Each structure stands twice: as structure tokens, then as C-alpha cells.
Image (spheres, rainbow, N blue to C red):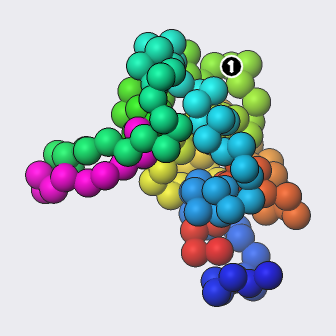
Amino acid sequence: MNEGKQYSLIKPTLQTPFHIDFDWWQQHDSNWRVYLQSYLCDECSESYKDLDKDTLIDWVDPDTGEVQRVDGVLHALMSHCANQPDFITLHTTMVDSVFRYFLANGNTPLTPEELAEGIGKPARTILRTFTGSKVFKGIRPVNS
């Protein structure tokens, strides 16, 4: 089931960048939108409760001034909710912490070592978790 993508045969290392592969997630989890909505803060949850689940919004790139159509829930998560002080806590599971950390940093690719610094979990544990046979929350090596 290649679906036109080339998969790397190189085993990821502590220096391999990872990210949330939203394309993979959308193709493999029919509840991905419900899951994203569960991460909304109370304020954003209230704002999005009556909107269509596939609502796109206009977003202006602050660097270029270019207007783009983006997913409203994802934009709210990344630009507002992920900046709330309780978005990642000491009690957040490692998989959730990594997922939330990617949301908070705009899904910029990070290595397990960088993630370890950000969430306070061992880099080797992060690497083992996200290179196993199961893909958690679409977190995959970049270009996989």
C-alpha cells in the first residue's frame, strides 16, 4: 500500500527530525477531527461549537502578508490553545506531550533530542516510541 509515496529504508536516529504528518493521520484515522477538537481550550471550544467541522478560515501570513485558507480548528490549536499554560502538564502522557509540543511549535520538525529537551522525557524513549510498528497520532519522521 505505497500510495505513491517513497518510504525510507533508513532507520531513524536521535538526530532524525519528526513531525505530525497530517496527511497520514487524515487517511488512517476517521476520528482525527474529533480528536483535534478535544484539545481546544474552553474559549476556542465555545467559538467552534456551532461551526461546520471542516471550516476553513482566512489566515494572513505575518511575514509575507499572503492570505491562505487554513483549517480553523487546527489554526486555533496552534495559534492559541497550545500557548495556554496548562496545554502540557507534568501529568500529560509522553505521546500526548510530543503531539502537543508539535502543535505548540507550529509543527516544525524536531529530533528526539530536541523533543526530550522540550518535554523532559528521555530522547531514546521518544525515538523507540515513534519508530515502532504503530504510528501514534500521525507522528512520523519527516519524508517517511
Q: Which residue is mark 1?
A: 90
The structure residue drawn at horizontal position 36% and vertical position 49%, both measured from the top left corner, is 70
**For the magenta stretch, what is the residue range?**
63-72
- Could you tell me residue 28's position as x and y percent? 74, 59
Depicted 55 relative to depicted 130: above or below:
above
- Residue 45: percent from left, percent from top: 50, 19
Q: Is residue 116 magenta?
A: no
Q: Residues within 10 Å of mark 1 (few under 14, many from 20)?
A: few
Q: Is residue 116 above or below residue 88?
A: below
| Quadrant of the rendered image containing residue 62 | top left
* Residue 10 appearing in the image: yes
Q: Nearer the viewer, residue 71 or 54?
A: 54
Q: Answer with left or right where residue 111 lies relative to residue 12.
A: left
User: Which residue of the protein is positioned furthest toward the right in this rendering?
Assistant: 133
Q: Nearer the viewer, residue 75 or 55?
A: 55
Counting from the top left corner in percent of width and height, residue 71 is at 42, 45
Q: Nearer the viewer, residue 133 or 25?
A: 25
Kindly identify the amino acid type of the residue bearing the numbered disc 1: Leu
